[in-house]
Image (cartoon, rainbow, N blue to C red):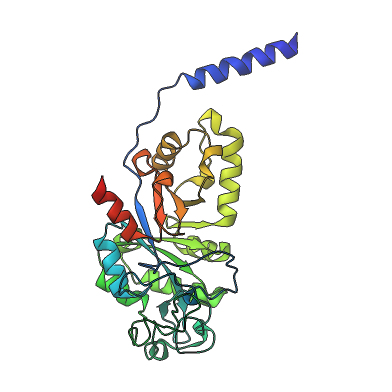
Amino acid sequence: MKHWAVRISVLIVIILVARQPDLELDHQGKTISYKGLVQPTDYSGVTNETCTARRLSSVEHPYIENTIPAIDKAFELGADTVHLNIHATTDKQLAVFHDWTLDCRTNGEGVTSKQTMAHLKTLDAGYGYRVGEEETYPLRGKGLGLIPSLAEVLEQFPEKSFLLNLKTAGPDAVEVLTNHLEKLSEAQRNRLSFIGLQSVSEGIIEKFPNQKTYSKEVGKRCLVKYIFIGWSRYYPKSCANTTLVLPEQFGRILWGWPDQFAARAQQNGSEVYLYQTKQPYAKESDYREQGIGLFTADMYGLAEAAKSQ
């Protein structure tokens, strides 16, 4: 008899939860542009060791990723936020550059974080980009001096938002980053969010508790809990005040996907994005009207799709 009473009680709770009115979205999903602008790239079979700069499918525009001209164009094409990788340099600056090492994309050599910012400024940021297996390097010579510091980027775009990934591990690199953040106003810091290593997130939060950070560990903790109890409309604290970046097709297993999950996130200070960095832009996984942001590498394709609507 007790078992039946428990089952009936659970059923009543589920019915009451299901009858609650839907939450209203605070705003539509936003757009993050991956590395500013990237060229069409063949990502098939890519591993962590693959030099993607040597796998361009074609060259569709004159911009080199992670440079100020590319960032500027991405915002012009409609990006709300630009994603950038950053590295702590030996002279305690933060360089905006994608790779751990310089050998793939530039005419330099060695670990990016083992260089000074002044040395990085002497390199050609477009040197290593190659179209397919052809021995053609269409961006070579066009990226001289274009590797920027984060300070230069923030000065150039004082009102814009950025999602940053500190690629340099270790407490010294985190200290360089937090020292940089201390020089910014609260309004300036609010334009920045961080994604990447858990140790970096912890180092940032220690000094700036309200700063938005995200790591795979945070994602696992919050989303696993949500998958099990999201039916109750409970939203885990570990999912709050962050930037949730989900792989494509992951959302279908989340309660209330897409709009109600997005509304719950927004209500708790978070933004949700689907990771769609492989090109071309795909309309079928664009849920911005339902509150889910788009993390894309194809701002040109997105802009063309918007024109045709």
As drawn, which residue projects farthest toward the top? 1
Q: Position of residue 198 (x, y in %)?
A: 57, 61
Does 273 sit left or right of 203 as displayed?
left
Residue 191, can we see it? Answer: no
Residue at 41 percent of width and 79 percent of height: 95
Q: Residue 120 sits in which quadrant?
A: bottom left
Q: Position of residue 127 (x, y in %)?
A: 41, 85
Residue 171, can we see it? Answer: yes
Q: Residue 289 sits in which quadrant?
A: top left
In the image, residue 110 above or below residue 200: below
Nearer-the-camera pick, 160 or 57: 57
For the N terminus, the quadrant is top right
Q: Position of residue 85 (x, y in %)?
A: 45, 70
Q: Residue 291 sits in which quadrant?
A: top left
Residue at 47 percent of width and 89 percent of height: 108
In the image, residue 142 above or below residue 167: below
Marks counted in the figure total 0
For the C terminus, the quadrant is top left
Nearer-the-camera pick, 122 or 117: 122
Residue at 25 percent of width and 48 percent of height: 308
In the image, residue 169 above or below residue 30: below
Does 245 sit left or right of 139 as displayed?
right
Q: Position of residue 216 (x, y in %)?
A: 57, 56
